[in-house]
Image: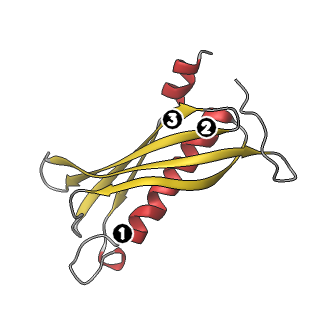
Amino acid sequence: MTIKERIEESETRQFKAVFPNTTNHYDTLFGGTALSLMDEVAFITATRFSRQRMVTVSSNKIDFTKPIPAGTIVELIGRVSHIGTTSLKVEVNIYIEQMYNYQKEHAIFGEFTFVAIDKNKDPVKITQ
């Protein structure tokens, strides 16, 4: 399988409903909850790409461009954007979907870096 095919095959999509227990006093999704969801999708994407033990080493950039209101559905999409020797980067985008119409808007962008590790938690080469 080529790198391009592996990137396409490892793309990860996850959907969540935004319920009141995940929102703040503005009735929008907590930023920390959004980050947690994004890190999970990024981890799954990195693992699906590499099929190795992966750990998050940084969240490089997070752009919150739209608040995510309660009562909506969010779609998270993770995609490998860069492959290094022992690390890779995953971009995660969150889109807001209205529950009762087809409106969809981009809300958050984030980039996460992962490192492949062995059983001793030492960095190892990402198998190509």
From the viewer's perspective, is 115 left or right of 72?
Answer: right
> Element type at marker 2?
helix
Above or below: residue 22 compared with residue 66: below
From the viewer's perspective, is 39 left or right of 55?
Answer: left
- Contact between marks 3 and 2 (CB within 8 A): the answer is no
Q: What is the spatial separation of the Cα atoms under label 3 and label 2, in whole angstroms?
A: 10 Å
| First along the sequence among labels 3 and 2 | 2
Q: What is the spatial separation of the Cα atoms under label 1 and label 3, in whole angstroms?
A: 23 Å
Task: Give the label, 1 or 2, closer to the camera.
Answer: 1
Q: Amino acid at mark 3?
A: Val
**Colouring chosen for the image of the structure:** secondary structure
**Residue assigned mark 2:** 48
User: Which residue is at the front of the view, 93 or 58?
Assistant: 58
User: Which residue is at the front of the view, 55 or 73?
Assistant: 55
On the image, the x and y values in percent for residue 77 come to 40, 43
Above or below: residue 13 compared with residue 127: below
Above or below: residue 51 compared with residue 32: above
On the image, the x and y values in percent for residue 35 come to 44, 62
**Residue assigned mark 1:** 31
Quadrant where the C terminus sits is: top right
From the viewer's perspective, is 5 left or right of 50?
Answer: left
Q: Residue at x 53, y 19 (%)?
A: 5
**Residue assigned mark 3:** 80
- Contact between marks 1 and 3 (CB within 8 A): the answer is no
